[in-house]
Image: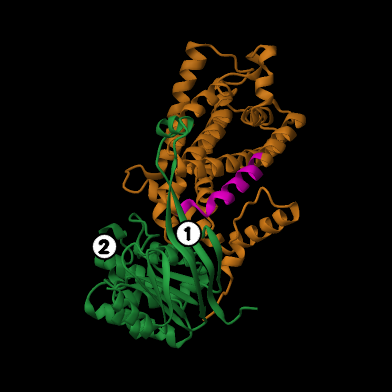
Chain colours: A orange, B green
């Protein structure tokens, strides 16, 4: 028998991270990466569980991942294009909407599921040690897989409307990466907080609704009066969504200035979220 | 430096700060009104133990004496409020079996999932799989979702996964209401094998007889305080005197 003897205690040090010097922090981060690597199979297994369990016992099964956004898009297209006649910058509105709404859905679903990821696995948290952030990451991985399937809808629209695809679409993975980093940071904070105060999950759905209207998803940024534009600069999701739209539809590269700011904010949010999560981790089992 | 040590607890205390208020609606007025928002509860105070590799520890004490809290601290599930704990080796907790099981997944999927929760690699699980199935005696049911399992089958499978690989440290909480007599004996036999191959065991129980049979050392707890730590025979004697 192979004895993989790793000292859990040596790796599992979650003291006051924020107060300790930087070298200490770097060391801690390194140990955490080691630990994550050790538990990588658990990460995949939990993500796999998340994906397979959900649509068991439903007739259409995984098809819901595609059907849901499809009907959402058709309805919103009718309201915003036919009824409200929102300008869509020369492309069919449903395409204009899809390239923004699908990533936004990914954001919303990741956050809402992550928020209850710790609480929903309380039986594990109180019994066995493993790095708790794995529960959050697994949730996000599962939502990413859903997202890729939901993009079938987009491809379908691209084909119907014979949309021109340019080389700039290659920016998409980078933009998506920025979005995922941002989502991970927020998710870690929300998941940890929700464990102590269940109000977070209700507050979140309220905030996300407001956030959606303040992000240029159903309308182009250009429609907004100049003096309110600064709102978007402060909103990483607005920059990200707008960048998706630019690289896929306008046949041009993204605004690198605002994208770098979004990247910086996302990495910042992730670091804060990670340290916050790790600081509280040792107490999860006592409160859940 | 402590290579021969499996578990070392230095002056461990655990204080639970229980939140009186579960929601903002209750919490914020209390905070503004400068009321106490936390209830403190000393679950463990000043515990000092040292267990060498291959030794087994039996923890005795009444309900609420802190036995399970200590087990949780050793498992790394919760961290001590004060003091230091050192644990060397892979831990297999037999605390409430089947915590990682998911009802919608099949027996086979759950075995692999639970294995990865315990930190066992997939390759190794592939090798252990047949043995796990044989031990659980559930061969015909492995491809069914475990929500169709009886509770006995459920715990049998969980136990089989937990003991599939010889752990460095086995944590056992109030053992073995698992399955029928035959299965229980099989489990005890397996634990005996672990002991012989050099695993460290930590057992919690109300029953002194069982502990005397399996442990070398004993820890007697009362209301979170360490009354005695030493030879198991002496511990059970002190336990008997206490009640």
Q: Cα distance, mark 1 to mark 2?
A: 38 Å
Where is residue B205 drawn, in percent x and y? 33, 73
Q: Give the range drawn in magenta.
A: A269-285
Specify the principal SS of the magenta part.
Answer: helix
Subunit ID for the residue under disc 1: B
Same chain for mark 1 and mark 2? The answer is yes
Q: Dot 1: within a 10 Å radius of its alpha carbon, few (fewer than 14), some, or many (20 or more) residues?
A: many
Q: Residue A95 carries which label?
A: none
Residue hosting label 1: B14
Question: Relative to the observer, which residue lies in front, B32 or A262?
Answer: B32
Callout 1 touching callout 2 (CB < 8 Å)? no
Observer able to see residue B199: yes
Left or right of A280 on screen, residue A89: right
Point 69% across, 31% down: residue? A247
Left or right of B182 on screen, residue B232: right
Q: In this view, does B126 lie above or below A130?
A: below
Left or right of A239 on screen, residue B200: left
Where is residue B127 drawn, in percent x and y? 47, 76
Reply yes or no: does residue A282 show up in magenta: yes
Residue hosting label 2: B149
* Residue farthest to the front, as pictured: B241
Where is residue A240 drawn, in percent x and y? 65, 32
Where is residue A149 drawn, in percent x and y? 50, 42
Q: What element carries label 1?
A: strand
Q: Is residue B182 above or below residue A161?
A: below
Count of numbered circles in the view: 2
* Residue farthest to the right, as pictured: A257
Residue B233: which quarter of the image?
bottom left
Question: Which is more N-terminal, label 2 or label 1?
Answer: 1
């Amino acid at each position: 028998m192979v004895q993989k003897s790793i000292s859990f205690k040596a790796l599992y040090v979650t003291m006051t991270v924020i107060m300790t010097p930087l070298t200490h922090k770097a060391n801690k981060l390194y140990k955490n990466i080691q630990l994550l690597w050790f538990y990588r199979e658990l990460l995949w297994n939990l993500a796999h569980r998340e994906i397979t369990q959900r649509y068991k016992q439903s007739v259409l099964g995984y098809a819901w991942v595609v059907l849901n956004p499809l009907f959402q898009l058709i309805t919103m297209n009718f309201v915003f294009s036919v009824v409200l006649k929102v300008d869509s910058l020369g492309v069919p509105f449903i395409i204009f909407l899809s390239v923004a709404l699908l990533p936004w859905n990914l954001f919303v679903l990741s956050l809402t599921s992550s928020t209850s990821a710790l609480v929903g696995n309380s039986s594990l948290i109180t019994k066995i040690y493993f790095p708790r952030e794995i529960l959050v990451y697994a949730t996000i991985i599962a939502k990413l897989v859903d997202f890729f399937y939901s993009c079938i809808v987009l491809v379908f629209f691209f084909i119907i409307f014979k949309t021109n695809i340019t080389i700039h679409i290659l920016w998409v993975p980078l933009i998506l990466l920025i979005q995922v980093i941002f989502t991970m940071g927020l998710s870690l904070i929300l998941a940890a907080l929700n464990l102590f105060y269940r109000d977070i999950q209700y507050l979140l759905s309220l905030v996300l609704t407001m956030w959606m209207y303040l992000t240029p998803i159903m309308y182009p940024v250009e429609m907004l009066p100049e003096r309110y534009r600064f709102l978007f600069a402060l909103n990483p999701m607005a920059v990200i969504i707008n960048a998706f739209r630019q690289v896929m539809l306008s046949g041009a590269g993204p605004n690198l200035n605002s994208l770098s700011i979004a990247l910086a904010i996302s990495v910042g949010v992730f670091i804060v979220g990670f340290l916050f999560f790790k600081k509280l981790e040792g107490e999860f089992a006592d409160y859940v | 430096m402590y290579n021969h040590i499996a578990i070392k607890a230095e002056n461990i205390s655990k204080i639970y700060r229980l939140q009186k208020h579960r929601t903002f609606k209750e919490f914020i007025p209390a905070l503004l009104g400068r009321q106490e928002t936390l209830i403190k509860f000393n679950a463990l105070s000043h515990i000092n133990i040292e267990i060498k590799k291959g030794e087994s520890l039996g923890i005795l004490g009444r309900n609420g004496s802190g036995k399970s809290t200590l087990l949780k601290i050793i498992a790394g599930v919760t961290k001590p409020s004060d003091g230091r704990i050192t644990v060397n080796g892979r831990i297999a907790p037999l605390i409430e079996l089947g915590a990682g099981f998911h009802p919608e997944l099949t027996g086979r999927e759950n075995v692999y999932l639970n294995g990865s929760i315990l930190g066992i690699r997939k390759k190794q699980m592939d090798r252990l799989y047949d043995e796990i199935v044989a031990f659980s005696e559930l061969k015909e049911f492995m491809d069914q979702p475990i929500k169709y399992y009886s509770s006995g089958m459920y715990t049998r499978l969980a136990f089989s996964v937990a003991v599939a690989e010889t752990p460095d440290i086995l944590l056992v909480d109030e053992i073995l209401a698992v399955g029928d007599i035959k299965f229980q004996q099989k489990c005890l036999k397996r634990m005996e094998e672990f002991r012989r191959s050099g695993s460290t065991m930590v057992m919690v129980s109300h029953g002194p007889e069982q502990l005397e049979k399996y442990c070398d050392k004993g820890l007697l707890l009362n209301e979170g305080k360490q009354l005695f730590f030493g030879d198991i025979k002496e511990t059970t004697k002190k336990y008997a005197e206490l009640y």
